[in-house]
């Protein structure tokens, strides 16, 4: 297992020693001339411990900062995406690391809180000298981390945040988004749901950026296809009592309830819907359903149709082996089989490390250019369609699945039935492509650590 250090998210000290650890060179024409180079100007920071590694004849380990929630609304999902990243890191370390350097990972709990995410990112970069940052579920946390990462030029992989703004107006040159977003999922489901269930819809929305932007995308697609949004109900984060919302739904009697509710909130909502048997009186669509939020719930609590990017029982080459690798590395886990957030964490980390190897350097600009436009085969990603990293938005375009509860499971944990799989070309977020304005390479600090 790779070295994983857990630290607290206290703020970094901004002293001269800290500044010397991460001395930034702008990739400008002046810097290039001064360095005598025609590529990206490398970071040549005089780190004290660099001399220690040189004296021992060993290469300095490559440090990766894991910015995953371990508590808060998305603590369960954050834990699973961290395990996915750890499995990819272990695979590389078992083969000798990257470019002859062992990979070490440091984790700070981002607590499903943007301010904590920002402090954690700052600390990992300035104190721990992290070359890359990986992880995020809450879109507000991801946005906060990405602003710090862009300031230093640090590549940040947003593994599981789904707000369309993450690859839209809040995109950055150093940020790469690996999950499907709310628009992708709405494109995959809304049109057919109107035909199957009816025109009158109510939106039930977590009151933060992911909820708002996802419901906005759903509204636009519903109205474009002849449907009508009767009302939108905003749900504060960490809501546990949904009685007032369910009473309102009983009064409105919509054909469809489209929820953009996540984490522990959706667990509570599902249980209360079932108690009132409202899962039988109207159709329910959850824009995206993360595996840790439903694993272990009985069949009565997994109702409606929902989106995902991966499922452990897909009948595709390599899936069984991937599941077996998870179970071998993490025996005795409460969640016995991996889900979509684990898959995203693993695939993102693996691809990043591959890009560093292919670039022959950890220079951030060189690795960014390897990631941009990167093509990934369906077989390699254990999905139905080939995927690619959109060079305009830095979002991974991948297969989008719609699922429902499996009434005839092959085994205990086979709780989803995949209804459809959409080609990424058919569900792309065109609005994000128009909204995203990536910083130039020249405006992005460059380093090689």
Image (tube, rainbow, N blue to C red):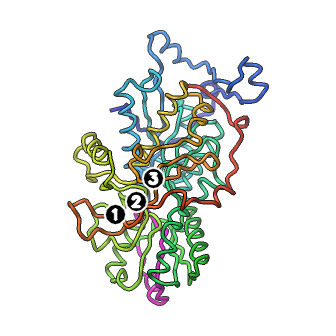
**Element at label 3:** loop
Q: Earlier in the sequence, mark 2 or mark 3?
A: 2
Answer whether labels 2 and 3 touch (C-beta < 8 Å): no
Depth check, front residue: 237 or 366: 366
The residue that appears at 48% across and 46% down in the rendered structure is 135
Q: Residue 62: image x %, image y %?
A: 48, 27
Marks 1 and 2, how far apart in space?
A: 7 Å
Q: Earlier in the sequence, mark 1 or mark 3?
A: 1
Q: Inspect the magenta stretch and tell me whether residue 263 lies in it.
A: yes
Magenta highlight range? 241-265
Depth check, front residue: 214 or 180: 180
The residue furthest bottom is 251
The residue pinned by badge 1 equals 294
The quadrant of the image that shows the N terminus is: top left
The residue furthest right is 30
Answer whether labels 1 and 2 touch (C-beta < 8 Å): yes
Marks 1 and 3, how far apart in space?
A: 25 Å
Relative to 337, is 283 above or below? below
The quadrant of the image that shows the C terminus is: top right
Q: Is residue 177 left or right of residue 267?
A: right
Q: Residue 293: image x %, image y %?
A: 37, 61
The residue that appears at 60% across and 78% down in the rendered structure is 223
Q: Residues within 10 Å of mark 2 (few under 14, many from 20)?
A: many
Per the rendering, the mark at residue 290 is 2
Q: Residues within 10 Å of mark 1 (few under 14, many from 20)?
A: some
Per the rendering, the mark at residue 385 is 3
Q: Residues within 10 Å of mark 3 (few under 14, many from 20)?
A: many
């Amino acid at each position: 297992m790779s070295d994983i250090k857990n630290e607290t998210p206290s703020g970094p000290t901004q002293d001269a020693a800290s500044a010397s650890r991460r001395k930034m060179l702008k990739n400008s024409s002046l810097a290039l001339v001064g360095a005598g180079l025609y590529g990206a100007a490398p970071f040549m920071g005089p780190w004290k411990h660099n001399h220690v590694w040189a004296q021992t004849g060993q290469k300095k380990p490559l440090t990766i900062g894991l910015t995953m929630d371990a508590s808060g609304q998305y603590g369960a999902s954050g834990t699973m995406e961290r395990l996915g990243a750890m499995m990819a890191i272990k695979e590389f370390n078992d083969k000798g690391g990257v470019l002859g350097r062992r990979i070490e990972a440091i984790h700070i709990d981002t607590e499903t809180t943007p301010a904590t995410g920002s402090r954690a990112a700052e600390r990992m970069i300035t104190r721990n000298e992290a070359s890359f940052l990986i992880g995020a579920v809450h879109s507000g946390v991801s946005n906060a981390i990405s602003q710090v990462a862009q300031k230093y030029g640090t590549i940040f992989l947003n593994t599981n945040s789904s707000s369309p703004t993450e690859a839209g107006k809040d995109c950055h040159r150093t940020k790469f988004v690996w999950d499907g977003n709310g628009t992708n999922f709405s494109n995959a489901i809304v049109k057919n749901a109107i035909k199957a269930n009816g025109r009158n819809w109510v939106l039930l929305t977590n009151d933060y950026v992911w909820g708002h932007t996802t419901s906005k995308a759903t509204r636009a697609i519903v109205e474009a296809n002849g449907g009508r949004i009767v009302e939108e109900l905003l749900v504060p984060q960490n809501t546990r009592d949904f009685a007032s919302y369910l009473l309102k739904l009983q009064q409105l009697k919509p054909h469809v309830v489209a929820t953009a509710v996540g984490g522990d909130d959706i667990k509570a909502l599902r249980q209360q819907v079932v108690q009132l048997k409202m899962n039988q009186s109207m159709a329910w669509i959850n824009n995206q359903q993360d595996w840790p939020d439903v694993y272990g719930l009985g069949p009565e609590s997994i109702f409606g149709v929902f989106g995902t990017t991966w499922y452990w029982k897909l009948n595709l080459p390599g899936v069984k082996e991937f599941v077996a690798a998870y179970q071998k590395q993490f025996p005795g886990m409460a969640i016995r089989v991996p889900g979509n957030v684990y898959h995203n964490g693993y695939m993102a980390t693996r691809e990043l490390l591959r890009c560093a190897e292919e670039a022959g350097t950890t220079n951030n600009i060189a690795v960014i250019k390897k990631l941009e436009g990167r093509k990934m085969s369906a077989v390699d990603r254990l999905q139905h369609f080939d995927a690619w990293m959109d060079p305009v938005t830095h979002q991974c375009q991948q297969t989008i699945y719609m699922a429902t509860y499996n009434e005839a499971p092959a085994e205990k944990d086979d709780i989803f039935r995949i209804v459809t799989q959409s080609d990424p070309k058919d569900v792309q977020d065109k609005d994000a492509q128009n909204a995203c304005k990536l910083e130039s390479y020249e405006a992005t600090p460059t380093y090689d650590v």
